[in-house]
Amino acid sequence: MLFLGIDIAGAKNSWVCELSWDKKKLFLEIPPYQIAALDEILNLVQKKVFLGCAIDAPLTYSSSTRKWRISDIALRCLLKENKNWVQSPNSMQAVPLRAQQLVSFISPYVGSIIETHPRASLFFMLEKEPLLKKYKTSPNALKILIEKTLAILPKVLNVEIKILPETIVSDGALDAFICAIIAFLYFYMPDKLYRLPLENNLRGIGPFYIFKPSCLEEPLEIKYTPGNYGDVLKQSWLIAIVNWLLKYTKHFHYADTFCGFPIYKTKPEIILSFEERWSYLPLYHLQKSYLKNCQYAGSAWLVKEICEKKKKDYCIDFYDKNKKAILAYERLLNKPALKINDGYDILIQKQPYDLIFLDPYADFWHIWQKVIEKILYKQNNSSILLFIPWKPEEKNYFKLCHFLEEKKTTYIHQSLTSLTCLQETGYFFSIYFFPKSSLSKKEIKTIPSITII
């Protein structure tokens, strides 16, 4: 069985590796070699039968992609501090075009064609080997890395590999060899590979596989995607209100009784959405350092970040019905959670707050009137920010709006009721800010407006 690995670069630095498998051992019929023109590979696959081929270059594209594909972002998150090993297709000049052109030529002659990233695959095969940072520029690092790779691979794959280190003469040759290994694993050991996520509207050839990382993080036990449309509205308003309130206090006392987790693991799709849709928002700049690691900061954690950036003294009180979330905050803030029975109990405490943030669960609509009445009473000594999702058919939402109009209380209200919002989340979203009674109307008028498209 033959497997083909191709490292596509410029015309003078593209490499090919032909890997053989006889059901006992892996070996090279000829050492990896350099090619000058794509038709050399076409001639090769017309003469020999290759079961699979893995290529180190972007093989898919989308009409909606501006810079990154979702798979690129996912891989960057896995590589963390080495994320710059993954380049955007837009920055790679002619490489993606050459690769996609090559695929269109050879696909009738090759069994399966997949995309891979040999450097990232080696990183996970060799348990984050430091030499991978140098092998592209240091001949000595390359020599040692080749020797280590050929010594460790038989143990990792549990197969015999009959290949001499001196047959791999360059970083391009090593990359092509690893591409061929990935093609082999795709057929014979697919459990050793990890498939990176893809958009729904992609064009091109082949899924994107890398060697499977040994410590893929388990997602938190939550039922939504952190950083979704609702979070954008909620946290954008929260940031604006907190920044505004910080003008009127030296020590900011904040309570979040539906706090969730401090830091979430999120999806590459969310990072792409922030890069391409929400980069104009202050929220993006606060979340940017987390998004780079495929993370998303929770609301209370963002308030901490804002206060520290502005060098303001602060105190954050927190509660959540999820015990794991409480433990996470207790560990990071080094203080106990509030001793209350549910998130709404904060509204009947005597303690005044500069801001209470309520992000309640679906049960809100069963008790909404009692909650609103408690909020209106709590306005005597605290400002309250209330965020609520609602279905278009939710009659109680309109009853709530009418109830507040009749009460003639002071509040600010904004809703997100776009078709896009409904299509992406299944909900509309509303946010209400109830300023504490000591704030004047003149002061309240200075609250900045937030526009979410």
Image (spheres, rainbow, N blue to C red):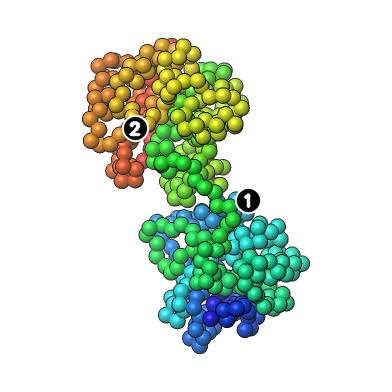
Question: Can the viewer see residue 276?
Answer: no
For label 2, the SS is loop
Residue 95 lies, in percent from the top left, at: 53, 68
Q: Residue at x 51, y 34 (%)?
A: 324
Q: Residue at x 63, y 83 (%)?
A: 30
Residue 362, disc: 2
Disc 1 target residue: 81
Q: Tell me if residue 247 comes above or below residue 380 in the rendering.
A: below
Residue 173 position, x and y percent, is 64, 74
In the rendered image, residue 248, in percent from the top left (x then y), is placed at: 51, 17
Q: Secondary structure at mark 1?
A: helix
Q: Which mark is residue 358?
A: none
* Frontmost residue, 241 versus 228: 228
Q: Which class describes the residues within 10 Å of circle 2: few (<14), some (14-19), or many (20+)?
A: few
Decide if residue 331 is on the left or right side of residue 344: right
Assign the C terminus to one quadrant of the image. top left
Identity, as a three-letter code, of the amino acid under mark 2: Ala
Q: Residues under labels 1 and 2: Cα distance? A: 39 Å
> In front here: 339 or 251?
339
Q: Nearer the viewer, residue 385 or 52?
A: 52
Q: Amino acid at mark 1?
A: Glu
Which of the two labelled residues, at mark 1 and mark 2, occupies the earlier sequence position?
1
